[in-house]
Image: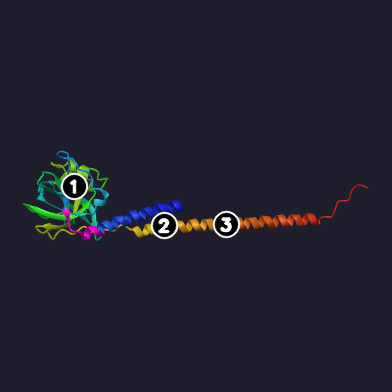
Amino acid sequence: MVLLGNWQLDRYHGRTEINERIDAGQRMAPVPLRDALATPPGGPGSLGPAPAEEKTWTKATATGRYDASNVILVRGRSVERRVGFEVLTPLVLADGTAVLVNRGWIPPAPGGDATAQPAVPATPSGEVTVAGRVRTGEEGAGAVTRRDGRLESRRIDLPRLARELPYPVHGGYLLLDEQTPTADPAFVAVPVGHANNWQNLGYVVQWWIFAVMSLFGYGWAARREARRRSGALGEASADRAAEPATPGPA
């Protein structure tokens, strides 16, 4: 139980660090993309190194041109209890590499189910400057498909998505905060949720209380058993003392 408490304490510290990086990323001035993400060294379809842990949630800025021919729809994403799509668009930089930019959330097409392909706002033409928080990719995307000229996926699985694109892709993506020219108002900002570190702290207290209760319970039971045995032995001695002596042979 003590070890389980220590494990939850480690998780509490880890989640607290994540929350601190989220808060710091919201307050900080953006840094150039190269300061947060390493440039992909490979060729088309390759993925660069993932961001270092301490670089996640860093606010970074980049300038390039959106590739409207490779818009990515990530389906099954919820905002305010509504299921829709997050829209990622590759931002192609001057060096020929690209970083995926999560431009926001949009609902599915009216009258359809949650998988009905939405009307995606037009992608800005010309040079675009973005600022957003650095995020790592997700796993378990399954197949990446192309429907009506757009890529679709269930997760932001960067290795799988990179293989579908004609340029090297950075190993992290940007969750958009600001854009010049201004982003289309149809996009809903993807909310950033803090990790529930207080739940882990509660588990720490719970496991350590259980450990103390177990020791107390063991001591109480041992003392009770010792007293019972002591009483039983005392009664046996008293019984033997009260027995009449057996007469010997005449």
Q: Which mark is residue 152?
A: 1
Residue assigned mark 2:
204
Q: Secondary structure at mark 3?
A: helix
Between marks 1 and 3, how big is the CA–CA gap? 62 Å
Closest to the camera, between mark 1 and mark 3, is 3
Q: Amino acid at mark 2?
A: Val
Residue 219 marker: 3
Residue 131 to residue 144: above or below: below
Horizontally, residue 199 falls left or right of residue 34, namely: right
Q: Which mark is residue 85?
A: none
**Does residue 28 show up magenta in the picture?**
yes
- The answer to whether residue 192 is seen in the rendering is no
- Discs 1, 3 touching: Cβ within 8 Å: no
* Mark 2 vs mark 1: in front: 2
Q: Nearer the viewer, residue 24 or 189?
A: 24
Q: Alpha carbon of mark 2 to alpha carbon of mark 1: how far?
A: 41 Å
Residue at 43%, 54% (x, y): give it: 5
| Region of the chain picked out in magenta, as a range | 23-31
Q: Quadrant of residue 200?
A: bottom left
Q: How is the image coloured?
A: rainbow
Say which label, 2 or 3, has the lower sequence index: 2
Estimate the x, y position of residue 232 in percent, counting from the top left: 70, 56
Type of residue at label 1? Glu
Residue 120 in the image, given as x and y percentages of width and height? 13, 54
